[in-house]
Image (cartoon, grey):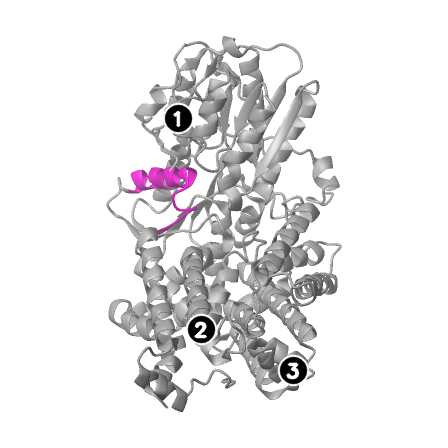
Amino acid sequence: MRRMTRSAALAVVLALVLAACSGGGEEPADTTAPPPDTTAPADTPDTTQPADDGDTTDSTEPEADAATQSDILVRAFQEEPQVLGLDPFEAPDYAYDIVEVDTSQYKKDGPRRIAFAIQAPEFSWPATYNDAVTARMEEAYSDSELILSPTGLGEADTQVGTIEDLLVQQPDALIITPLTDVRGPIERAAAQGIPVLLCTGTAETDAYVTRVDRDNLLNGMLGAEWIAREIGYEGNIVLLGGPAGVPTAEARLEGAMAVFSKYPDINILGQEYTNWDAADGRTAMAAFLTQFDDIDAVWTDGAGQAVGAIEAFKEAGREIPPFAAEPLNGFLRLAAEEGFPFVAVGYPPSHSSQCLDAAMAVLDGEPVPSFINIEVPIFDTDELDEWYRPNCIDDLWLPTPLTDEQLIDQGMCEPA
Amino acid sequence: MSIRERLRQIGPYTILLVVLPVAALVQPGFYRPANLQNVVRDAAFLAIVALGQLIVIIGRGLDLSVGGVITTASLLMVYFAGTASGSLGLGLASVIGVTLAIGLLNGLMVAFRRVPAILATLGTLFLVEGVSLWLTGGRSRGRVPEALVAVGTGKVGPIPVPVLVAAVVAVAVAVVLHRTTYGRALFATGLNPEASALSGIPTRSVVASTYVIAALMAALSGLMLSGLVGFYDRTLGVGYDLDSIAAVVLGGASFLGGRGSVVGTLAAVLGLSSLENLLLLQGVGESYQLIGKGVVLFAAVLFTTLVRRRPSSPAGRKAMVANPPERNKETV
């Protein structure tokens, strides 16, 4: 909550300085459709294995090779709810609009230079995101060069300049994790003949080749539908979203609202943006708890605010209701300790490696889909034991691309 | 006492005077005991930071690094005390050591190298965040120790522990500012550093010490905050820099130094916390929340600056000469 006053406080401070001196949404319908040319979808390596290699959603398993990416996304809407025993969703119109992109013009043999305007490893999610792409590069493309140029969330307005600097280095392909409006550099790169791929995020232009991301509308719907069933399609709920105006968070919220609006007996007591932040989640939930005596479930789109909200329930001495969140080890620890029902719908940071694979496919001249929907882990209370890693830190996103040995070496887990 | 002076004394309470009646009219839930506990506890964290900021501002400075100190203190404690091989003592020692280093760096840069405070503390903020990132790779390695959770979430009777801690800190700051030689030297340095130096006050040391105190108080707040949240949070300190400055100045301090009030600062902090809580309880959209906060803050600022401004009429100036504003008076 405190950051929400930041802008106003800045204005106040500036006004006071002057006075003293003088007087004393990710758009879910984004089809991201560059020039069409239909062929086969790109492979999407499986990154959704739990700690003991148990099953997860299989909506993008290799048997879908002959299908188009549209088929895969439509099937994701239909099949992923069934992982949780829910009825299939109707796929949105944009799921049918994905096309294959001819990339033969970008074909380049031999060692390649891939530039990646990536989110800075400021906290565990982007740190894993960075590690995963670096590891994938070493593992599969060691003869090529990867130039990482990070931008922090707090300096997102500098990302355009960062990308311009990368373009000067004339990479063979440019991957961008958009943190701000990057239409300009994308279009300039395209004009220079450099293929651009978006990895986690969107841009208001069609000058890029493909976008590798998760359909976040679907993520929001999955958690909401599970919550609705869990409370018998009636009751009082609270929604804690991510950062206001961030496309990923807005799409998830839109998905959740679409589900809850189907059930007239579900009453949304309150809704608050909490920046995926534990402190903000705690503050918001503490306020709701003083105001409402009956909260039957909490929908969140991120593990951070969920952890804070659970702490608020604990402090208030109230029974923790069903939660929808993400598979962060700290959230799973609380679920194990407190025993509340939950669903976890993932957004694994390790999917950055898939972005690199897609870039290499483009440079191989292979056709790629205009949107590649990544696989995510989806599980509920029944699979807690398969996913929770009690010997590891709270700040571990699951699934992790790191081996047990690497986790121990990096101090993230104790030997089991 | 002139009307203007009376209004000036009301200034720090402006937000409270707006929020409390409005809350009674539109949101009775605001006055539920449990909610009031939340309000005063949230205020306690900011109050401790703001009281540190008050000391800096009285000395004619500014500290933008307090938010970074909050996050760093939390990170260090989790890193060194939240693992099987760590200990609370090691965590506390690391927090105190690093915080002292940050405060000293700020103080030396501002007081002895004459670097503008806004630049020196901004540089420190970047440095602290960079070192934290380098040390951790962006990941926290442990968990918040239970002892901190007990402090952050505990209550003594109906009163949250952080509120008690903030009260102790406030009394200590008031005593130091108004009952010690150091406090008098600080006010004098803020009012007129040259004259103070000529009169034998070690002004550079006094100014440098304010940054050390502010850093230590921010670290204290950060430790309790991480206990409250129960989870390492990279953004724990975000916003505390500007909010603390706003609270101090709304509380009656001046960027020109030499003026400031502990009670005024606490009133402004409580006002800001109440405002946030009321808007949250009202359930208005994000955009309206921001607009509401902006409007109330600007109204408070306008009121404060208007009653501080020199009168423009000759009669008013005469009245001011006859009854000068108590700029030099050290009000608690």
User: CA–CA distance between discs 2 and 3?
Assistant: 25 Å
Q: Where is residue A89 in the image (x, y as percent from the top left)?
A: 34, 29
Q: In this view, does B29 lie to the left or right of B179?
A: left
Q: Is residue A143 above or below residue B326?
A: above
Report the magenta residues as a range. A237-260
What residue do we see at 64% from left, 34% from top?
A131
Label annotation for residue B182: 3
Front-lying residue, B192 or B20: B192
Say whether residue B106 is magenta: no
Q: In this view, does B184 lie to the left or right of B293?
A: right
What residue do we see at 49% from left, 32% from top?
A200
Mark 2: secondary structure: loop
Q: Which of marks 2 and 1 is in front?
A: 2
Instruction: List the residue tagged with mark 2.
Output: A24
Front-lying residue, A217 or A33: A33
Residue at the extreme front of the image, as rendered? B314
In the figure, residue A46 lies in which quadrant? top right
Q: Position of residue A403 (x, y in %)?
A: 69, 33
Q: Nearer the viewer, mark 2 or mark 3?
A: 2
* Quadrant where the image shows the N terminus of chain B: bottom left
Label annotation for residue A205: 1
Chain hosting mark 1: A
Q: Residues within 10 Å of mark 1 (few under 14, many from 20)?
A: some
What residue do we see at 38% from left, 29% from top?
A204
